Amino acid sequence: MDALIFVGLLVSVVLLFRQEKSRTALIVWWITMAATVFLLSHHITSGLGLGLSW
């Protein structure tokens, strides 16, 4: 999950520095955010299913 966050943010920053369309960087940013939230919720719920607590 850390690699996904790092790569998504890195791609966003590279797109901004290359002065590509900021809309593309924003789309990459939101895709990264959505994937991170999904994976985090899956990680938390699977931990709770094992009897672990926060």
Image: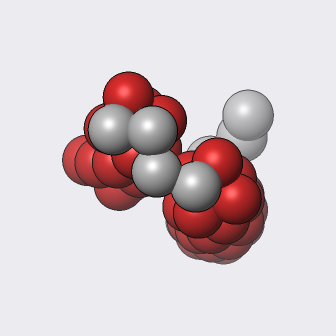
Where is residue 32 shown, x and y percent of the image? 56, 58
Looking at this view, is 50 or 21 the one in front? 21
Point 45% across, 39% down: residue: 19
Where is residue 29 shown, x and y percent of the image? 62, 51
Q: Is residue 20 left or right of residue 17?
A: right
Where is residue 25 shown, x and y percent of the image? 57, 52
The answer to whether residue 20 is visible is yes
Q: Is residue 14 left or right of residue 28?
A: left
Point 33% across, 38% down: residue: 18
Across the whole image, how many numbered discs are drawn on residues?
0
Residue 5 occupies quadrant: top left
The answer to whether residue 33 is visible is no
Looking at this view, is 28 or 35 the one in front? 28
Point 38% across, 28% down: residue: 17
Looking at this view, is 48 or 17 the one in front? 17
State whether residue 53 is above or below residue 26: above
Q: Is residue 43 left or right of residue 11?
A: right
Where is residue 1 shown, x and y percent of the image? 37, 53
Residue 42 occupies quadrant: bottom right
Color theme of the render: secondary structure
Point 73% across, 34% down: residue: 54
Residue 4 occupies quadrant: bottom left
State whether residue 2 is above or below residue 23: above
